[in-house]
Image (tube, rainbow, N blue to C red):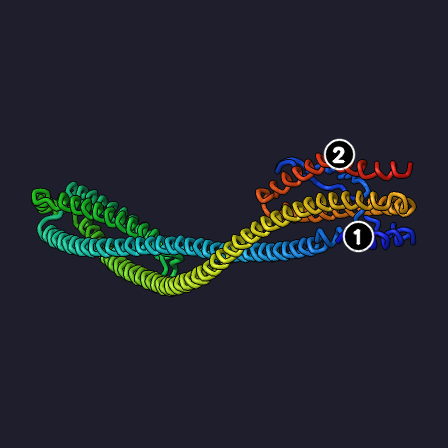
Amino acid sequence: MDTARPSSGAQHSSENRSGNTDSETVTVRPMKRLKNEARVDQKKELSFEISPLTVPLEQISSQLGISESNSAINRHSLRLDDQYGRLNCHDSQLHGLDNRVKAVENKVKKPCKDHSTLQQRFEQVCEGEKGLIVKVNRQDGRITSIEGEATQNSATLKGLQTESAQHSASIGTLQTSFKGLDSRIVRIENGSADNSETLKSHHSRMDLHLCQIATLENRVDDLDSRVKRIDTEIQPGAFASARRDINTNKTCCEQLDKVAKRQYSEIKEVKSDLSLKADKSDYKKLRDEVEKDANSNQTEIQELKQMIQNQEKLIRSLQEFCQNQANLVASLQREVIQCQANAQATEDELNLRSDGLDKKLDVFNKKLSQAQEMEKKHYADQNQVLQTRIEQVEGRHGRLATDLATHTTQIRALKLEYQSFERKVTDEIKANIVDGLRGDLKHNQETIKLRQGTLETAFTNHCGRLEGLTSRFDKFETSLQSKMSEVKREAQESVSQRVNIAMRAHRQVSDMQKLEEKFDKRKPQWKQRSMESTEPSQISRH
């Protein structure tokens, strides 16, 4: 190995003379140092001052295996980039799964909103159904009130019929009383016609009877006018609504009740008057007085006959009045029957309406039950689909989590491997540089001792070549350091950007700091050795 070095040195000297020293120009870049995880990276420039060496650059690079280390570093960087690309793919897949889960949640929220709207519609329909039930109950109440008033009308009709029977009986009694009066008058005519005073009193009593009969006729006319007004007010088929029918029936019944009460009171008054007038004692006194004054009152008897005729006319008018009363009762009965028929018609109409509403409610309930069943089925299907999708997403998430864990472990293993490789490279670089420097110094001393006199010129050329080589080696070392710093910086940046902050290379920084400290410590030793190697050459020159 020692014999081959001068030849290689001569070759490199010739290359340096030919002008190829500046063929490799490398720009020195500052290296980032990571002090702590939370601090900002500080930049420092590494500058190594190395003394001129007598070893060729190609031999040093071949001995150190720098090209192999660069290729290994490149392979590691490619593997790291591949791992980071996979991590990015997994991150994008996770984002896609999150977006799918959000879309599924939105799809779940939409049927929930539809369910809330359907629930509101169902509540509105229930409220409408309650309103219909209330209306039906009101109609039922109206029907019951109409039925009660119809029963009341039938009761009042029966009362009117009984009162008309009583009226007819009272008219019969009046007719019998008038027949008695006629017989008495005949007896008075046959017996005596002398008592003018009794005739006058009898005339006055008859006038009172006529006045009472006139008042009764006026009352009957008033009743007829009222009945006609009621007849005009109550027409068949004039029911606008059930309430109006009820009110009209109430008014009719009240008016009929008042009329019946008035007629009953008037009949009682007539009966009392007739009973008072038809007292036996009065008629006995009248008979005695008439028998005494029969002969002197013939003219008055004629007048009495005329009065009897008038009484007969009055009786006929009373009979007509009774007939009118019977006709009125019959018309009232017909009107009551018509009212009952109208009430029955309204009741039937309300029943039909309630039946139609019941049918509509049944149809609505069926549709509502069908909609609820469809909604339940839809929600069950949606829940099943969501459950399957959630299970799929959970499975994918679990697989991605396991893949992420495996990738993190692989990244850590690669990081440790890179750290160990970097340490190994630095150790080899240190050992090779030190051994090479020692061997070069020994070789230079031996060659200088052997060729002190004869190779001064060659030594000067060799020194120039060594200076060029040292400059090239300095450039190469700076470029190597810059490349190492760039590789380390790229690795650290990629790790710090794509992995958590806890995965930073704290050990790398400490190792590199120790390496720099060791280089800083050995710089003076290398300078001293280089000075020692240059001193014998200067002595030989002198």
Q: How many marks?
A: 2
Q: Nearer the viewer, residue 530 or 354?
A: 530
Which residue is at 68% across, 37% downward? Answer: 518
Q: Nearer the viewer, mark 1 or mark 2?
A: 1
Q: Is residue 395 visible?
A: yes
Which residue is at 65% across, 36% downward? Answer: 35
**In the image, residue 90 above or below residue 51:** below
Tell me which label, 1 or 2, sits earlier in the chain.
1
**In the image, residue 366 above or below residue 426:** below
Asked where in the image residue 453 lies, by quadrant, the reply is: top right
Q: Is residue 360 visible?
A: no
Q: 293 left or right of 360?
A: left
| Quadrant location, the C terminus | top right
Which residue is at 81% across, 48% downward? Answer: 26
**Which residue is disc 1 drawn over?**
5
**In the image, residue 25 above or below residue 341:** above
Q: Nearer the viewer, residue 300 or 345?
A: 345
Q: Residues within 10 Å of mark 2 (few under 14, many from 20)?
A: some
Q: 458 left or right of 489?
A: right
Picture coordinates of residue 76, whole percent (x, y): 64, 54
Asked where in the image residue 312 lies, by quadrant, the reply is: bottom left
**Which residue is disc 2 drawn over?**
524
Q: Nearer the viewer, residue 522 or 369?
A: 522
Q: Nearer the viewer, residue 373 or 82?
A: 82
Q: CA distance from mark 1 to mark 2?
A: 26 Å
Mark 2 residue type: Pro
Name the secondary structure under disc 1.
Answer: helix
| Quadrant location, the N terminus | bottom right
Q: Residues within 10 Å of mark 1 (few under 14, many from 20)?
A: some
Which residue is at 86% across, 46% downward? Answer: 451
Mark 1 residue type: Arg
